[in-house]
Image (cartoon, rainbow, N blue to C red):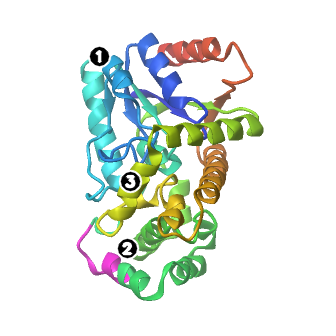
Amino acid sequence: MQKIIVIVGPTAVGKSDFGLKLAQAFDGQIISGDSMQIYQEVAIGTAKPSKADQAQVKHYLVDEKSIFDSYSVKDFVAGANDAIKEITTNHHLPIVVGGTGFYINALINKMQLGEPGEYKDSVASEWEEFLAKWGPQKLWDELNQKDPVAAQKIAVQNSRRTLRALTVISRTGKLFSAQQQHIERRYNALIIGLNSDRQLVYNRINHRVDKMLAAGLLDEAKFVYDHRKQEKQAIQAIGYKELFPYFEGEQGLSDAVAKLKQASRKYAKRQLTYFKHQLPVEWFDPLNDPDYQEKIYKRVNEFLTE
């Protein structure tokens, strides 16, 4: 089974910087496992790797789509699979770096994604019509009735995942949660997790938001706001929608920025919850342990020679 390295962790912990170092140390190339870095028009709010970083190590699934294009986890898995084939054919090590836990899980494991629109059948369209008519809460209520175990792992507002679960249940006649428990591995993945004391991570998040604002985040968010009716997905990204009340004159900038920092901290907490419960992660502390890099390099060497 093909071996790959995956680097996960909460936002702002330093995944991209370490991924670059790891790639240089092990002749690797990087696949972005972030659901928003694929979009060409947004870079600051998505913490996209800089052009200088991309020049040092080749990156895949960065700047390959427009925010006006649709892009799903199914598209991500297909693109990442192609990237892994190309990287290994060229005798490099595939290194996936990202914070979108479900995307990482779907890549590593052969999950039944059941994407709405994957098949042109009545099942997907019926649930999409149900969502349009009744809204996210009633859609989630339907899933909670059919499969409460699956529902408890999906936020009410995450209609895409709720649709996916209901579509799979309707197509297969089996519980979505039961299907997810019997997953076949697609890759032999060493999953490296970076994390540290909660307050240290939160401080880094707050500082990164300030740096993003200084780099022009407000202008980028205004572009997203102005085109929100045409965009397919970027509007969902934390870092943009929290600033919409400021553009609408409903909130001062300082209040909007405070909400943005709060949302980013909550997102980091959700990321960690997902990684700790859904993926077999080996954790390292980049902020308190001065030897963390050496320890990870040793673990990667062991993994590659097993």
Give me the C-alpha separation between circle 3 and circle 2.
19 Å
At x 61% / y 44%, what residue is drawn?
275
**Three-letter residue code for mark 2:** Arg
Taking depth in this image into account, of 112 and 116 the one nearest to the observer is 116
Residue 187: x %, y % from top left: 42, 35
**Three-letter residue code for mark 3:** Val
**Three-letter residue code for mark 1:** His
Residue 19: x %, y % from top left: 48, 24
Which mark is on residue 171?
Answer: 2
Q: Nearer the viewer, mark 1 or mark 2?
A: 1
Residue 11 seen: no
Give me the C-alpha separation between circle 3 and circle 1.
26 Å
- Indicate left or right for 134 with 297 as reference: left
Crowdedness near tag 3: few (<14), some (14–19) or many (≥20) residues, C-alpha within 10 Å: some
Kindly identify which residue carries mark 1.
91
Main SS of the magenta part reads helix
Using the image, determine if residue 288 lies above or below residue 162.
Answer: above
At x 64% / y 14%, what residue is drawn?
295
- Indicate left or right for 188 with 89 as reference: right
Check disc 2 and report its element: helix, strand or loop: helix
